[in-house]
Image: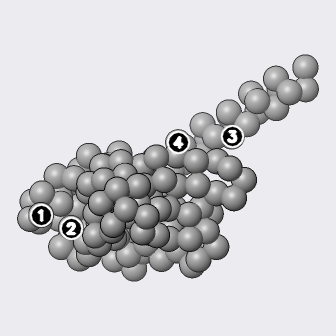
Amino acid sequence: MSIDDDVALLERVPTLHLLGNDALRMLAIGSEQRNLARGDLLFRQGEDADAGFVVQRGAFRVEDHAGAEMIAGPGALIGELALVVPMKRPSTAIALEQSAVIRVARSLFQRVLESDPAAARRLRDEFAVRSSQIASDILIAGGKLST
């Protein structure tokens, strides 16, 4: 894929879309592509997480040991939180078919945010909205459980 193709893919990712074209171009240029065969492990639960992955093609099963599972296909961002904070992987991701991802290292992501304060503010605001929505959802669920 060309840099323009990668930028177009990153533009489709809701969180990354907030960064704007210049920041996405820097991410596309600085990131790496990884190809995986069916059954290949993208990452394992408990590993240090230093990057997020945008699915270019194919699909991945993302599951934790409690049985929660989701399928991530083209345009999905796997490991979003690892872009902003050091952490352990909360899940395992396995390729369900021949697949490719763009690996965005946290160090690259942070450099992009440092070079574009407006993009960093847009991302911060989005995370604040999400956190508020999660807190609200928890209160609503808690209220339903206590009645």
The residue sitting at 57% across, 78% down in the picture is 48
Q: Residues within 10 Å of mark 1 (few under 14, many from 20)?
A: few
Seen in the image, is 38 located left or right of residue 35?
Answer: right
Sequence-wise first label, 4 or 3? 4
Seen in the image, is 132 located left or right of residue 12?
Answer: right
Secondary element under disc 3, as helix, strand or loop, is helix
Between label 1 and label 3, give the one nearer the viewer: 1
Residue 1 is tagged as: 1
Q: Which residue is mark 4?
A: 129
- The answer to whether 143 is drawn above or below residue 123 in the figure is above
Instruction: For marks 3 and 2, give the CA distance.
Output: 33 Å
The residue sitting at 56% across, 71% down in the picture is 44
Between label 3 and label 2, give the one nearer the viewer: 2
Between label 2 and label 1, give the one nearer the viewer: 1
- Residue 76 position, x and y percent, is 37, 50
Quarter containing the C terminus = top right
Q: Residues within 10 Å of mark 2 (few under 14, many from 20)?
A: many
Instruction: For marks 1 and 4, give the CA distance.
Output: 33 Å
> Which amino acid lies under the numbered mark 1 shown in the image of this protein?
Met
Q: Which residue is mark 3?
A: 135
Instruction: For marks 2 and 1, give the CA distance.
Output: 10 Å
Secondary element under disc 1, as helix, strand or loop, is loop
- Residue 122 position, x and y percent, is 38, 52
> Which amino acid lies under the numbered mark 3 shown in the image of this protein?
Ala
- The answer to whether 52 is drawn above or below residue 147 in the figure is below
Instruction: For marks 4 and 3, give the CA distance.
Output: 10 Å
> Which amino acid lies under the numbered mark 2 shown in the image of this protein?
Ala
Q: Are marks 1 and 4 in contact (CB under 8 Å)?
A: no
Instruction: For marks 1 and 3, give the CA distance.
Output: 40 Å
Sequence-wise first label, 3 or 2? 2
Between label 1 and label 4, give the one nearer the viewer: 1
Sequence-wise first label, 2 or 4? 2
